[in-house]
């Protein structure tokens, strides 16, 4: 008998081992074609020198491939489609209940996962194969515009197809905001996407992303959103497969194709569970990464000096002398604790 737990755990295990299985193929391609940056970043976002960042990241940026996120979204996509086909080919039995694609729970996050993956892949490809005289990848303006389009489509689906007009505030209840859910959705997606800068330190992004999606998977399960819970844990399985090869020394990094796919999908999952208010808590490491970069940029522009030795924050700790593995493991520990707190607030506040 297929129970809800099996419906969640079976695809999760499948996506993990599928990710492990396809990694040699992806890894061979990335190394054969030298899919890494040809020179380390030496200029900060504001145009100033980034000598500390360059010294920290030089070996990683020029010798470790990007685009490892292919493993995450490819194994998740194939898992979801495989279980969909199984459910359609075997009608009437328990296996027919394994389909986790549903209009009101997983169509939209599946779309955003693939849309973010495609846009991020294009950006990674242009970034890696560019001539030295040209700018990196897609320009920030183009990248943000594409994120805006993805966010607008998602917001439109929520408002017009799912009839979402309110947000759930823990301990308060639902607050009707009507059409304002559209700009809110887009703003949250921009904010979480900015946290994708957490990618780049061995093992960091994989651990943090797996914890965040596990937290939302638990919330969805508690709320009886079984398809969404299964979807979230499929991503966890795929991310853990990536993490298996991303722990020090990292074989590759997520790249934009991974971080963009996961951050835009995270926004959708948060809104589908109606737990977007606790997203800044559950995804606090992403918020800190994006926030520290913003603070650094504004401080240098208006005060003429830096707040952190290096931004985002995890590089600041490394610049202080912490070994990268210590930074990563402490981020993992803190992520587990803060995500658990977010889940508690979400569940008690229902």
Image (cartoon, rainbow, N blue to C red):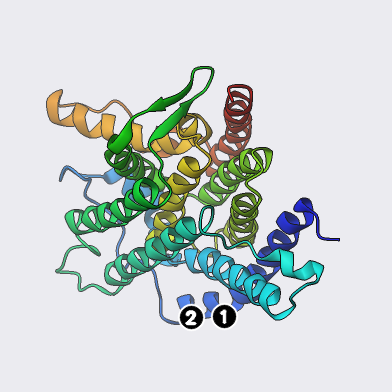
Q: Position of residue 243 (x, y in %)?
A: 60, 57
Residue 193 as seen in the image, left or right of residue 84: left
Mark seen at residue 161: none
Q: Pick the residue in front: 133 or 8.
A: 8
Q: Pick the residue in front: 262 or 56.
A: 262
The image quarter containing residue 231 is bottom right
Task: Name the residue furthest right.
Answer: 1
Mark seen at residue 29: 2
Which residue corresponds to the image point at 46% horizontal and 82% vertical from the top-left?
32
Residue 183 against residue 126 in the figure, above or below: above
Q: Secondary structure at mark 2?
A: helix
Which residue corresponds to the image point at 28% horizontal and 38% vertical from the top-left?
179
Residues tagged 2 and 1 counted as in contact (Cβ below 8 A): yes
Find disc 1 in the rendering and name its residue: 25
The image quarter containing residue 259 is bottom left
**Dot 2, crowdedness within 10 Å: few (<14), some or many (≥20)?**
few
Separation of residues labelled 2 and 1 (CA atoms): 6 Å
Residue 284 against residue 242 in the figure, above or below: above
């Amino acid at each position: 008998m297929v129970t809800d737990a099996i419906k969640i755990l079976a695809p999760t295990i499948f996506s993990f081992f599928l990710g492990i299985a396809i990694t040699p193929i992806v890894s061979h391609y990335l190394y054969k074609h030298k899919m890494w940056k040809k020179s380390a970043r030496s200029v900060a976002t504001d145009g100033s020198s980034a000598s500390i960042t360059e010294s920290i990241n030089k070996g990683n940026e020029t010798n470790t491939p990007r685009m490892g996120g292919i493993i995450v979204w490819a194994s998740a996509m194939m898992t979801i489609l495989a279980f969909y086909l199984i459910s359609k080919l075997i009608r009437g039995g328990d296996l027919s209940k394994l389909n986790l694609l549903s209009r009101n729970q997983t169509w939209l996050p599946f779309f955003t996962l693939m849309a973010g993956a495609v846009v991020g892949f294009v950006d990674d490809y242009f970034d890696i194969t560019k001539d030295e005289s040209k700018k990196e990848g897609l320009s920030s303006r183009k990248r943000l515009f594409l994120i805006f389009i993805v966010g607008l489509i998602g917001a439109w689906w929520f408002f017009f197809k799912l009839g979402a007009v309110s947000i759930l505030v823990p301990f308060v209840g639902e607050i009707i905001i009507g059409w304002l859910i559209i700009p809110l959705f887009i703003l949250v997606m921009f904010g979480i996407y900015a946290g994708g800068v957490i990618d780049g330190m061995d093992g960091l992004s994989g651990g943090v992303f797996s914890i965040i999606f596990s937290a939302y998977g638990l919330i969805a399960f508690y709320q009886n959103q079984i398809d969404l819970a299964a979807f979230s844990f499929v991503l966890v399985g795929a991310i853990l497969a990536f993490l298996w090869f991303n722990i020090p020394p990292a074989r590759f990094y997520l790249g934009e194709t991974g971080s963009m796919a996961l951050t835009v999908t995270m926004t959708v999952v948060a809104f589908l569970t109606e737990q977007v208010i606790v997203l800044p808590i559950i995804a606090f490491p992403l918020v800190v990464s994006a926030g520290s970069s913003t603070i650094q940029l504004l401080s240098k522009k208006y005060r003429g000096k830096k707040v952190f030795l290096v931004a985002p924050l995890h590089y600041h700790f490394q610049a202080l002398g912490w070994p990268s593995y210590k930074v990563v493991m402490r981020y993992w520990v803190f992520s587990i604790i803060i995500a658990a707190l977010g889940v508690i607030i979400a569940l008690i506040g229902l």
